[in-house]
Amino acid sequence: MSFSWMAWTWPTAAFFGTIFLLLCGMAVWEYASPGGNPRIGVLRFETTRGDRLFLSLLGSAFIHLAWLGLVGPNLWWALALSVVYAIGVFRYV
Amino acid sequence: MGRTWNNKAWFMVLPVLLLVAFSAIIPLMTVVNYSVQDTFGNNVFFWAGAEWFEEILHSDRFWEAMGRNLVFSAIILVIEIPLGIFIALNMPKKGWGVPVCLVLMALPLLIPWNVVGTIWQVFGRVDIGLLGYTLRALGFDYNYVNDPFDAWITVIVMDVWHWTSLVVLLCYAGLVSIPDAYYQAAKIDGASRWAIFRYIQLPKMNRVLLIAVLLRFMDSFMIYTEPFVVTGGGPGNTTTFLSIDLVKLAIGEFNLGEAAAMSIIYFLIVMLLSWVFYTVMTAYDAER
């Protein structure tokens, strides 16, 4: 079966691979510590680990877009900022 | 006692996962792949990196369409949600009026989008349309073809006509599920009509209202067929919403890379706003 119509590239394959690995990691984490660790953080409503991952990924996408629109095409700094943001979300949200 | 684990349910979910993979995940992956490349057809692609995203983010055309979409969705929610609640509150709860009202309410929902567009396109015409001709005869200078304000009014009224029923039916379902005991208790306490609505009916409708707001927001933010059939995005670009602009870019201009980048930004915005609506409404529900 040919997947050439999907126009795969190495960077996009790595991107989806990372998302897949993140989801696998979350599944393992859930298996090791069931229940999703619900808590009320700085946003003042309950979030689980899955919510925090969703917020991290969605926020990272917007950080990259904002960087691209306001600063320029060098996205490594945006990636670094996104990692810091994700750590913040998992720690405080 | 240890918790019993039964993972058979995962196998039940598998068919849906496969279906979603084929209908949503694989196409989404393809769009992401297209968004970082350029193509002239024949399955030949050239790496473009983040260029298309940069171009979209600096494009006035995109932000203008986005602004129109946000204004449209806000107007739709402000009209359809209160109107839907009002109609549902005034619908009969028993007797022959119930099936009559339900059928009448369901009718607009059964009409396909393109047919709704065609109905309103003809209805609003000043030469042969009942609405356009009547408004002209009454002295209104109505013409949705060349007046942006009239075009907006037509598209909004059409959407209200088409989709308020959905809000009505959802609210009605919430209302009929309220046990009579609540109303009897309110009567004993001498509660006013407003107090009954505020403290009994509205809280009981909260969950269906959440679904109604989410559905109406997502649908209105992604609206395409009806305004495309009625106004074609005009006059000028005044009713060109994001989806119409996206189709013009992808099919009209065959600019697949840029259209894919625009789709992803569009998708992220829909996801963010839906998450905000969902979180705010569920947090409000939990507080009470």
Image: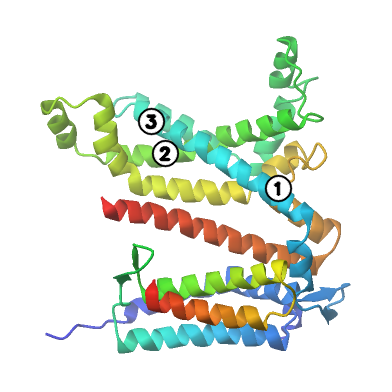
Marks 3 and 2 close (CB-CB < 8 Å): no
Q: Is any atom of residue B198 visible in this view?
A: yes
Looking at the image, is mark 3 or mark 2 earlier in the sequence? Answer: 3
Chain letter for mark 3: B
Chain letter for mark 1: B
Residue at point 34%, 24% (across, down): B96
Task: Please state, as top left, top right, bottom left or bottom right, where the C terminus of chain A lies in the image.
Answer: bottom left
Identify residue for label 3.
Answer: B99
Left or right: residue A38 versus residue B56 is left
Q: Which amino acid does label 3 sit on?
A: Pro
Q: Is any atom of residue B110 visible in this view?
A: no
Q: Which of marks 1 and 3 is in front?
A: 1
Decide: few, some or many residues near mark 2? Use Cα within 10 Å; few <14, some 14-19, many ≥20: many
Identify residue for label 1.
Answer: B241
The answer to whether tags 3 and 2 share a subunit is yes
Looking at the image, is mark 1 or mark 3 earlier in the sequence? Answer: 3
- What separation in Å lies between label 1 and label 3 (alpha carbons)? 37 Å
Q: In which quarter of the image is residue B128?
A: top right
- On residue B169, the disc is 2
Q: Which amino acid does label 2 sit on?
A: Leu
Secondary structure beneath label 1: loop
Q: In this view, does B257 lie above or below B154?
A: below
Q: Is residue B25 above or below residue B102?
A: below
Residue at point 44%, 34% (across, down): B82
On the image, the x and y values in percent for residue B179 come to 19, 39
Q: What residue type is labelled 1?
A: Phe
Decide: few, some or many residues near mark 3? Use Cα within 10 Å; few <14, some 14-19, many ≥20: few
